[in-house]
Image (spheres, rainbow, N blue to C red):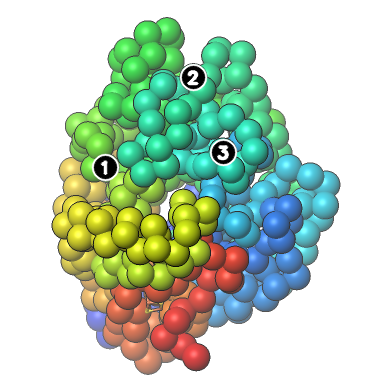
Amino acid sequence: MRLSVSFTWHMVDNIIFTPFKIHNLTINNRMVRAATYEGHADFNQTPLPSMIGLYEELAKNEVGLIITGGNATSQSGRTIRPRQASIQTTEQVKRWKKVTDRVHLYESKIFMQISHAGRQTLKKVTKQRVLAPSKIKSPLFKQTPTVLNKAEIKNIVLEYANAAFNAKAAGFDGVQIHAGHGYLVHQFLSPHINKRTDQYGGSDVNRFRFLKEILSEVKNSCGTSYPVIIKLNLGDDLGFSLADAKEYIKLLNDCNTVDAIELSYGTMDQPFNIIRGKTPWDFGFTFSPFFSSYPPILKNIVFHLMKNKIKKSTLPFCFNYNLKSAQEILNLSSKPMLLTGGIRKVRDIESILEQGFTAVTLSRPFIREPDLVKKIRYKLTDASKCINCNLCTIHCDSPKQTHCYLIS
Ligand SMILES: Cc1cc2nc3c(=O)[nH]c(=O)nc-3n(C[C@H](O)[C@H](O)[C@H](O)COP(=O)(O)O)c2cc1C
Ligand code: SF4
């Protein structure tokens, strides 16, 4: 049973500003910056000097824990985002070290998110085979994947461990393994994407094996006391259900290699169902690599055909949109539980924490207002100014740095 923490609104040190622990690491407050693609790397995935300023701004403004955008474990694992960062080379480690050194001048902690895209990428971007647990195409990316053999799976597990080792060398306080949003780990976990009949498929225990091996190898390479957290889905639009998530939470309890769990939803096949809100596809069609080779007239035809279909299948935004499902998971694990998705109001944050969630993770609100935590601490605001227009999100496919398009 979780203890609910009583809350008094007028207290200066309310529940948001109480510290919490992930493994042995103390985090000063319960406001976490959710992993957010930065667009601050060069085209070789090496962080640019501007990455330092981005993260210093969040640390200076008292974000308790910062989680970076997803870093690719290998070239085949990179996404279509042109300025995605990575942590494979000595130079990348050196550049990330400059970021963590700057963040550590303040009280914030910083974790690196590590991910392999699996089938959610394009051959023309990676120049490599598209890899997946089974030969099932992503409905959006439409690449025929090469099915991973056991040796290749082992190799990718080691790439995760290597990325985590490098992250530790670069000064990160911990790592987050991305097990959601339709990326490779999620592809293994989903019974609708993973149709394997070997020891990596066919049952929950088998589908869980890939993640289990990653977590175990990461702890082997970084040491058991190095904090390792995961981002796990509560569901998706392709059939992964809350019941699946519950089974995986139980399996995570059995292996003591994860130190906290962040709960999310959706896949990149319908990216707006991960984040909800407006769907400014008109912009996406301008620069998305999906349509880069189309002549303008064809682009327009495809755009009009797809636009309404996509809009119809998009889930509406509501505040705290993952909360209801997450409540069903909360008591299944004694690990710290972090919640993401549409969390905007101070009163809601307090309520979510009172219910027993350990921390809240916010993405767009920190793009809009990097100083949101400080504003909340000094009672200068009671809600984020982000209006979920998603212009920042749609531009992730462009070479631009991620920023709020409402701020000129
Ligand atoms: C511009 C943008 C980039 C994102 N990049 C990532 C990412 O790299 N990894 C990830 O796990 N989630 C990513 N997300 C999802 C967020 O981490 C978060 O779970 C989601 O946006 C819901 O939180 P919010 O309503 O506070 O924005 C991204 C979201 C946005 C808006
Ligand atoms: S562009 Fe600004 S207001 Fe719009 S979703 Fe992004 S952060 Fe929020």
Rendered location of residue 169, percent (x, y): 76, 47
Amino acid type of the residue tagged 2 in the rendering = Val
Q: Residue at x 45, y 28 (%)?
A: 144
Q: According to the image, label 3 marks what residue?
A: 123
Q: Quadrant of the N terminus?
A: top left
Q: Is mark 3 within 8 Å of ligand 1?
A: no
Determine whether label 1 and label 3 are within 8 Å by CB. no
Counting every numbered tag in the picture gives: 3
Q: Residue at x 39, y 58 (%)?
A: 298
Q: According to the image, label 2 marks what residue?
A: 147
Circle number at residue 278:
none
Q: Tell me which label, 1 or 3, sits earlier in the chain.
A: 3
| Between marks 2 and 3 in the image, the one whose residue lies nearer the viewer | 3
Q: CA distance from mark 1 to mark 2?
A: 22 Å
Amino acid type of the residue tagged 3 in the rendering = Lys
Please tell me which residue lies in front, 298 or 22.
298
Q: According to the image, label 1 marks what residue?
A: 236
Rendered location of residue 53, percent (x, y): 67, 76
Q: CA distance from mark 1 to mark 3?
A: 24 Å
Identify the secondary structure beneath mark 3.
helix
Would you say 400 lies left or right of 17 here?
right
Identify the secondary structure beneath mark 2.
strand
Rendered location of residue 380, percent (x, y): 37, 92
Q: Tell me which label, 1 or 2, sits earlier in the chain.
A: 2
